[in-house]
Amino acid sequence: MSSSFLKAHLALGAVALIYGANYIIAKDVMDKGYLMPLAFIFLRVSTATVLFWFFHGVYVRERIKNRADWIRLAVCGLFGVALNQMFFFSGLKLTWPINASLIMTTTPVLVLIASAILLRERITPAKLLGIAMGGAGAILLIAFGRTLHFGVDSILGDFFVFCNASCYGIYLVLVKPLMKRYSAVTVVKWTFTFGLFAVAPFGIPQLGASDFSAFPLSVLLSVGYVLIFTTFFAYLFNAYALRVVNPSVVSIYIYLQPLLAATFSLLLGLEQLTPNKWLAAILIFTGVFLVSRPQPAPKPSAD
């Protein structure tokens, strides 16, 4: 395993850890409504944009080379930042959390299809089996023993969450070619900049109505975690990994997020270890391995 390949997987593992902890750390902010959804999105995107501009100005100072790349960056900002986050928060408001979690397991499948169409990425039996096993493990972990709520009353919210998964999948595929020409910091800086312009008209009015003086310290710390880790570092690490691995590999790590969230809950005594969790863990880790292992280079044809 090459050094760059190992670093890419360490970055993806760090993203999964960040999101896994986010389920617990940011619970008060999400559940108790300290910030309205679009205000929270604007705060996330604007904070990350400032941080990316700072790091780019200090460490990278790289310029975009041509008009086609500017257009692709703008589209990545629309799908990967603005539509992605606005569809998710809007959908979550209209559906149940378990529905959203289950629908998000479609992301690796959508990425695999988009990669095959747009990037000519080969769909191998190992990838199909890995995504199926990882998805089965994630669904088992999320849905076992819980009541599902799919129905007419949640159909719009479910559709919005599916749009969120689709937008993120399209973003991972569209942004991959840019990673071959620019540093990760350059790409996410401009992706978030364009995304900020799309989010601002919706988020600024809600942010102005937020009463930050009423936030307890625990909520302020949770908001800080979401801004710095769940947004800034998560997008940066994913972008870094995309320089080395295919979008389908990045997307399969989404299956680790509920597993790590359950692990944190177990460590904190909030959940019990059960046989279904063991089985889910085995399925998820096997699925991630099958999708993420390096593919052998095709043998040259004999003359």
Image (cartoon, rainbow, N blue to C red):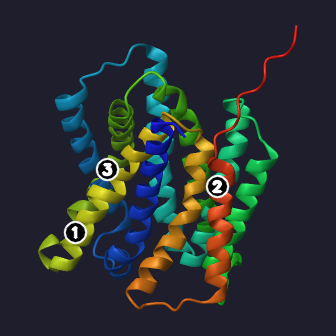
Type of amino acid at the residue the image marks with label 2: Phe
Mark 3 lies on residue: 232
Q: How many marks?
A: 3
Question: In the image, residue 186 lies at what x, y percent?
Answer: 34, 30
SS label for mark 3: helix
Nearest the camera: 188 or 215?
188
Disc 1 target residue: 210
Q: CA distance from mark 1 to mark 2?
A: 44 Å
| Residue that badge 2 annotates | 289
Is residue 96 visible from the viewing direction of this image?
no
Residue 281, can we see it? yes
Answer few, some or many: residues within 10 Å of disc 1's Cα (few below 14, many 20 plus, some between 14 and 19): some
Which residue is pictured at 53% across the width and 27% down the height? 177
Dot 3 amino acid type: Phe
**Residue 165 location (% of width, % of height):** 59, 55
Residue for point 25% across, 27% down: 60
Quadrant that contains the C terminus: top right
Q: Which of 204 and 48 lies nearest the eye of the viewer?
A: 48
